Image: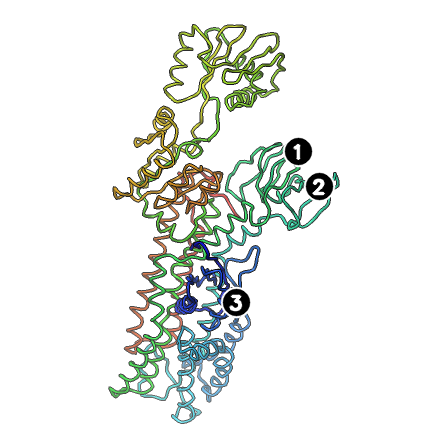
Amino acid sequence: MSAAAGEVVTDLTVSGMTCAACVGRVERRLTRIDGVTATVNLVTGRARIVHPAGVAPADLVAAVGRAGYSAAPVPAGPVAAVPAEPDDGRLRPAVTAALALPVLAVSMLPGLQFPAWQWVCFLLAVPVVTWGAYGFHRRALHHLRQATATMDTLVSLGVLASFGWSGYALFLGGAGAVGMRMPFSLTADTGGAAHVYLEAAVGVPLFVLCGRSLEGRARRRGGSALRALAELGAKEVCVRRAGVERLVSVQELMPGTEFVVRPGEKVATDGVVVEGGSALDAGLLTGESVPVEVGPGDRVTGATVNVGGVLVVRATAVGADTRLARVTALVTEAQTGRARAQRVADAVAGGFVPCVLAVAAAVLGFWLGAGGDPQAAVTAAVAVLVVACPCALGLATPTALLAATGRGAELGVLVRGPEVLEGLRRIDTVVLDKTGTLTTGRMDLLAVTTAPGVDEAEVLRLAGAVEHGSEHPVGRAVAAAARLRGRAELPAVEGFAATAGLGVGGTVEGRRVRVVRPDRVSGLGGRLREALDRAGSDGRTAVVVELDGRAAAVLAVGDRVRPGSWRTVRRLRDLGLEPVLLTGDGPGPARAVASELGITAVHAAASPERKAEVVADLRAAGRCVAMVGDGVNDAVALASADLGVALAGGTDAAIGAAGLTLVRGDVESLVVAVRLARRTVATIRANLVWAFGYNAVLLPLAALGLLNPVLAAVAMSASSLLVVANSLRLRGWRPSRGVSRSVSRGVR
């Protein structure tokens, strides 16, 4: 949910919601305020509200209060994804169980029934019905004053009806006789004998309380990934001011402050290395398995772990501006929204409770009007009240999304909202940018072709020495390759000279060395000429190395294809997705990369406007398009596609326009995202089928008197637990074997 000009977004924590009907009630109350739109999530207990700037947060809190719930603005800083359970905690279920279990055992097992057992059970049931079920009664009464009904209304009425009929039977109906024995029945049929329903009066609150307690624990497990993200950052940092080091809280850091990171410590915030060299392990944040070497001038990310030497870092971003904070905000935003399927379920659940109350009243009236046993009529009506459960409907989608978005964050896949997962499943075409997406985005030495009799290692060592002082991307690529292959310091250069647009030269170990453009060298032939022609056709930049005035080698420099790009393209095809290459580079480089990766559809030399046109043409042809990019020139196309996918290492414009961000900066994570989306949607569908099917089957059975209220309470609690348990399976979901193992590492 995004805000337009003149609007602001406010997040509230809402307490007291127990079912999907509560969600609808809070949303309706909030949207009565002019200009306000709201999305409420049952699982996370959050409301995201877009409202005019003139509407104060206090007005929103008051509106939630009028709906019968309590609310408060979300506090600044990291917060838990799932709030604590409202009010029952552990004490109430434990005491309720201690009192209710003897009643259940004696009532349901005739062999345990002793003289006056029913009066002992009645005394044990009184605190359960009053204190144990107090939360249900209190909330039901509160909603009654609001002229509304919720799941608590059904539970409260079921408990009171069971207990009230039992009291009547004991005091006035003949069930209080000392020698009375009562057989247990799975249905509402009592055989005409005196009967009390104390097992239902204590069983319903017991099973509902235990079910909600287990739900709460499971839901908090589903939000563990977000809490783990929030806890990743360092708590204290050693700052350096005027050469003096001092340990302070990380909240005191300001941009420009220099701080020290010793081996084993976390980088406190995003910054640039000013002194030292080390390797940083970013596995907890990005899932990248290999530590990255950093030195002066390199950017570092907060929450990464220093596994090497001592670093001095200058802070460039703090607080909400850090990468970790943005990642946490994205996951929070995704878990706050609601999917389209959930909006349908919530709409159904909103009218569900009043319909159940009407059905229960109709069942009671029908049984009595047909001359049935009044005890059986009450039993059937109570069973209808208890078995009907909109909780499963309300939990079906948000629990799956909570688990999926948390697992996605662990795998380096951040979704901006639940609609992204839904949209990702429908994608059939993936448009891929080239530079920085399929390729590394930096110049690398790709090929060395030497003249006959010239040693490749020697010529590269000498060329790297003269290029060491160059600031040109080609020169840096040659120097880096020479250092890497030689694994030693490059020799010194005398008389270094650089001519803009032409090349560099100097004397190395007594030899005159020049690295120049091909058009500055005459008489090239043989394999050097072939190397130049090949580099030109592949869209690579070629330079010629001269030793003592003679052409010795041709160096081809270009943008290297990422190691995982070929696997990504192949796996996208395996998933039924068609890859399309869309780049601003010329036809030569585009064709070379497309040929290497096996992509047939290529659009080269595309301006930002042309990229958006290509995406629009594909959509007009009936394709569902995902655009993957990382640069400012991709932002328009990302925004115009059905789904925009950005690499985390890309520009802020690209990330802002995308609905999906690949934290590892590796396009291979896109395959993981597609598979996770498909599994999530399948889980949501299974949850909804169960939630609707449960009520469709058991409500008629309860109305026909074929379901005992105790069994109804067990079934009702089990339905919600099954939905939550099925969703939590996503927390353990792993990419298939074909996906790189490193992508399965992440927040732990």
Q: In terms of sequence position, does the residue under pointer 3 or pointer 2 come before the other? A: 3
The three-letter amino acid code for the residue at tag 2 is Arg
Q: CA distance from mark 2 to mark 1?
A: 12 Å
Answer with the quarter of the image where residue 25 lies: bottom left
Which mark is nearer the camera, 1 or 3? 3
Q: Residue 70's x, y, as percent?
A: 50, 70
User: Can you give x and y, in whole percent of width and height, for residue 677 in the image?
Assistant: 38, 49
Question: Measuring 33% from the left and 80% from the top, which residue is drawn there?
Answer: 381
Q: Is residue 299 above or below residue 694?
A: above
Distance Cα–Cα, label 1 vs label 3: 49 Å
Q: How many marks?
A: 3
Residue 204 on image: x %, y %: 42, 75
Left or right side of 477 for 350? left
Image side of residue 265 versus residue 31, left or right: right
The residue that appears at 53% across and 73% down in the rendered structure is: 92
Q: For the residue carrying disc 3, how many other residues have a C-alpha within 10 Å: few (<14), some (14-19), or many (20+)?
A: few
Mark 2 surroundings: few (<14), some (14-19) or many (≥20) residues within 10 A: some
Q: Which residue is mark 2?
A: 240
Kind of residue at badge 1: Glu
Tag of residue 275: 1
* Circle 3 residue: 58
Mark 3: secondary structure: helix
Q: Residue at x 51, y 24 (%)?
A: 473
Q: Nearer the viewer, residue 657 or 450?
A: 657
Q: Residues within 10 Å of mark 1 (few under 14, many from 20)?
A: some
